[in-house]
Image (cartoon, rainbow, N blue to C red):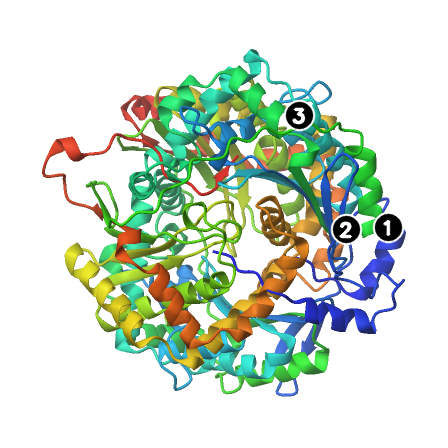
Amino acid sequence: MRFYSSWLGFLILLLAVATPSARADDTVGIPVLFKLSNGLRVVVAPDHRAPVVVQMVWYKAGSIDDTPGKTGIAHMLEHMMFRGTKDVPAGQFADRVAAMGGRLNANTNQSGTDYYEEVAKQYLPDVMKLEADRMAGLDLSDALFKPERDVVMEERNLRYDSIPQKLFYEQFYRRFYSVSPQGNPTIGWPQDIRNFTAQDARDWYANFYTPNNAVLLLAGDVTPEEGKKLAEKYYGQIAPRAVLRKPAPLEPVRYEARRVTVHNPDAPTQILARAYRGPGWFEGIAGAAAPVNDIPVLVILARILGYSQTGLLHQELVVNRGLADSVAVYYDPAVRGEVPLSIEVLPKAGVDMAKVEKALDEVLASLLTSGVDEATVTRLVTATKFDQVYVRDDPYLYAYNLGRWLISGGTLDAYINWPDKLPAITPADVLRVARTYLRLEQSATGYLMTTPAPDQTTQPDKGTNQPKEGGL
Amino acid sequence: MRGFYVYACLLVLAVLAPLNGYCDVKVQALTTPKGIPFWLVENKGLPLVGVRVAFRAGSAYDPEGQEGLSALTVSLLNESAGGMDAKTFAEYVQGLGAHLDIATEDDIVGITLTSLRDSRVEAARALHAAIVEPAFTRDDTRRIRDAMAVVVRQNQVDPAVRASRELRKLIYAKHPYGHPVNGYLNTLEKLDSGDVRRFYKTYYTRANMSVSVAGDITPEEAAAFVDAAIDGLPEGKTPEDIPVSYTPPAQYLFVERDIPQTHIRMGHLGIDRKDPDYPAAQLLNYALGGPGFSSRLIKKIRVEAGLAYSVGSYMNPNHVGGTFEVYAQTRNANAERVIAMIKDQIKRIRAYGIEADEYHMAQDYMLGSFPRSIAGTRDLLRQMTIMQMEDLGTDYLNTWPERIRNVTREDIFRVANRLLDPARLTVVAVGGKAADKAGDK
């Protein structure tokens, strides 16, 4: 769970004392956004404290764009991006970055797919050339595609099929959403992966991998002038294409509390999961306009419920009542589509799940009745605002967060400025927003039981998790 | 978090950048007015300060039968402390916009505080509460112990973690490096706050401590911070090293699990950071099983034979007695073949050394990756801790590129024969039935 906030105030202070032309003083600069003539948006976020640069490219092609029967194709393409082009034969991309001492990886998630390389500064032109090359000239021949499809199946075996918690969440989110592709695992259902063809990958690549559907971020030891020159040189010649995007099916409004129970004796712990439907920054529930004033309040509400040891649920369920070993709460609205506010409780071994659920509902009910005090809100607003300084301290994290924000529909200004709304949040706002969104008929509740299923027919097939992020 | 470099390094970079691509980080060894030694890297740019206090009190110091005590103790520093209950203390830190994190390793435990420059005085108070005034209440102890037990149970299910644990156990025989930092379920359940207090009293002392500071802070401000944070901690003494004196013979362990993939771990004792051959060992390891797609293990086993999703090796340094370890994941039916191929590659590198192009690639990698390894406050603070604890000197980072460049191919050949020994490799395989015959060869 990541939160963003403005540290622009600090930057203005820093710049005020810096000589405008002296780079050495201006060690961390304001990010600059510009657009190339082919539609590629470029952000340069200078940070000259270390001779290291992160290049990251985001494509607006995520698992929310996967079509029925082709779940996991966004992630499959991510794998193919490492399989070679005419100029950089199979396997050499990673080889060349490794030879520079660089770090690279890629992620597929709901909103898009991102690729990054972190290298010593002098290698920036080399990795930009490599990344631009695979934006246009990827080899998606059958000969390369089929073995990589096997690799993806192996990845499922390795990283999902043996992990009971992940199998549980896969079932849980498929039930949480009736029709939205957000209920599918990012890696895809096994039967879909098995049936992928190279043509599926070619269609996906031809449609989505085009500069006007991408954002390039350069964060680290690079100036906006250098960044612009390099971006023009390596990406400027790639021709744009029209993107055809079928709108994802919208999850209808519902008035039904759902339940999912999975029995798995291999599970190391029980899990009680609860998720409520919630709005994202760029789209509300069931396709409604995003209620942008509610979102910072929901961010604070999630922290009131579950931020480290101070969270209300931790205090009640773990410390005071001794029913659980840990509680976590997630709400990450900077994505495409709506986004759940979700709670995970790990009950103590042997504690009755229904008892834990009852306690959870009591704590929430008492919040909805009496609200929260001002000191709590103020403290979490402070923590949330200052966390943005820590995010900027890490060029990778900064590029990731900003890139996902931009690809999902946000502007640079909005990214920098939204945390300014945080200090105005009052306990009354929190209470109103909690009453709006924490409603059982908008939720699903899941049990992962460590006991054997009473009836074998209710056991799930071995599938995969609902991974929010799928790595290389 | 990345990137804390002093102003001067940009000037150095301007001259050296075309050749090197690394930068001189200036580490200062200082002493506070109250006599506490600490290391500092000054770095402007963001209004942040990071401080890491470490004690030689890692899981290697867990008494036998009390495995997990070190991790339990350090975890409890972030609970009730300084006259505040756990909740009040956490609220205090949050209200400052600061973070207090703990890390537990084999040799050391680290307590890291990151704070805004402007709230550093209040943040020093929080660090003092955690390090000098922890309460170790019975309730906190029970709760953290239970949370650790959950992690232990989760790790038992994860085949990769299981394989790695079993390998360490076999390689280190009776040495405490052989047990997991979180201990075992049956040792955790016996630990109480009295055990924690005894452990804390023995090891959390000034003589057994290192302090590292990095960020937007002057030497005077840093000294005041450290004095405020450490005030009142007793002098104590440095614990004796626990030498790794016994070298076990090659062993084979198969753990049957109903899963499609077998997780393989192989290894034997390795090398320490202080060893003059350490840079050569890192270059050797890069050529054999380093990251990327160019290592011999990746080329032969993943790229050419298509046998494994991942395979690689690493040199894991410890305070005493590091390890050399190889990991691989493959289908159950291929496990036996993959193990044989790994042994074959180790034999070859011992017999023939590495080629000129492998040598240059390894050096390029080590030099290019170097800035990344010290590029964040946390990364830098961790490096500074190791440098202090291992007595490597303040210029260790500055001389590292030169030491990499000075290694010859002959050195690597010699070190391959000194360090690697296929006959001594212990093998652990966690996977399905077809993998069981793997160790017979």
What's the amino acid at mark 2? Tyr
Q: Secondary structure at mark 2?
A: loop
Q: How far separated are the C-alphas under marks 2 and 3?
A: 25 Å
Question: Residue A320, position in %: x, y?
Answer: 24, 73
- Is label 2 or label 3 in front? 3
Report whether residue B387 is seen. Answer: yes
In the rendered structure, the answer to whether residue A441 lies left or right of residue A350 reads right
Name the N-terminal-most of marks 2 and 1: 1
What's the amino acid at mark 1? Leu
Q: In the rendered structure, find residue B16 and report the number of the disc placed on it.
A: 1
Instruction: Tell me the chain of label 2.
Output: B
Classed neighbour count for the residue bearing mark 1: other residues with Cα under 10 Å, few (<14), some (14–19), many (≥20): few
Q: Are marks 2 and 1 on the same chain?
A: yes
Q: Is residue B417 above or below residue A204?
A: below
Instruction: Tell me the chain of label 3.
Output: A
Q: Which residue is mark 2?
A: B22
Q: Where, by quadrant of the figure, is residue A392 drawn?
A: bottom right
Q: Are marks 1 and 3 on the same chain?
A: no
Q: Is residue B395 above or below residue A105?
A: below
- Is label 1 or label 3 in front? 3
Instruction: Tell me the chain of label 1.
Output: B
| Label 1–label 3 contact, CB within 8 A | no
Q: Residue at x 44, y 81 (%)?
A: A375
